[in-house]
Image: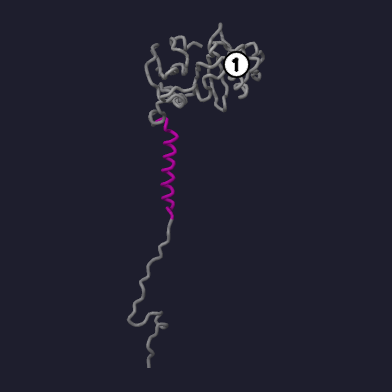
Amino acid sequence: MVPEPTSESTGGVTAGEQRPVLTRLERPTGPGAEGIIRWGLLLLLMGAAFWGRSYWMPDAWRFPRRESAPDGLSWLPFETTRQGVLERLARNGAQSTNIEPPRMGPMVWASHVNLTLEGRPIKEFALIYSDEAQYNFRALGRGGAKPLDAAALATPGSDTARVVAIRWQPSRSFVDENSQAVPADVLGELGIPHEEGKNPQGSGKIYRWNWTGVTARYETVSNQLILDRRPPRDDSDSGAK
């Protein structure tokens, strides 16, 4: 006599029942090598576009048009006293060779070369103080570079004479120089120029900013920005060194 099949002998399936349908176990998978490479290339392209934005992005996208007058430059405000300028230079490690005495006769511009202010390298800048005086150049001494003596360089009235004009030679890229464009350092300080025109002398361009009480002028040939809060004067006079 043949025994009837039981659930134990049929693997848990009795007569009239069907085995359950088995499905493949799906396991979550990562992006894989191909996906990682794709995202890596995308991030690389985005980084390159951001790093090289000065080559393709219009200035109007990168810098706004400034409606209010700046209070000097970020690294040197107007109204800083002559004594204050000298103390700041000394505090930043300036040497006697970083101050440039007039070459011929008295000049209103007080010139400074090849120094660093708060970690920012500055090739050249010059100042006009409210009394149009400079420094006590005899205190610079001779015999090479020496630490700047702010107290000895100060002339009478240094505690009240204040910065009223700044001439700055900003750093500029190869593209800026050859396209006669305003350097990014200047645009970052002043925003988009209000006016643009050709240099009357025939080469280069001149860009101007006009606010109430403050004007600015950048020349591509000389690579000089003049920021002035004095009453308007003849351009030929403001460019003298």
Q: Is 106 drawn above or below residue 159 in the view shown?
A: above
Element at label 1 = loop
In this rendering, the answer to whether 134 lies above or below 87 is above
Residue toward you, 30 or 82: 82
Q: Position of residue 30 (x, y in %)?
A: 43, 55
User: Looking at the image, which residue is at 55% across and 19% down?
Assistant: 80
Residue 53 magenta: yes
The magenta segment is: 30-55
Q: Is residue 44 visible?
A: yes
Q: Residues within 10 Å of mark 1 (few under 14, many from 20)?
A: few
Name the quadrant of the N terminus. Answer: bottom left
Residue at the extreme bottom:
1
Q: Is residue 239 left or right of residue 112?
A: left
**Can residue 174 be seen from the camera position used here?**
no
List x then y, in percent, for residue 157.
60, 12
Q: What amino acid type should be assigned to the residue bearing mark 1?
A: Asp
Write down the residue under mark 1. 159
| Residue 20 position by quadrant | bottom left
Colouring used for the render = one colour
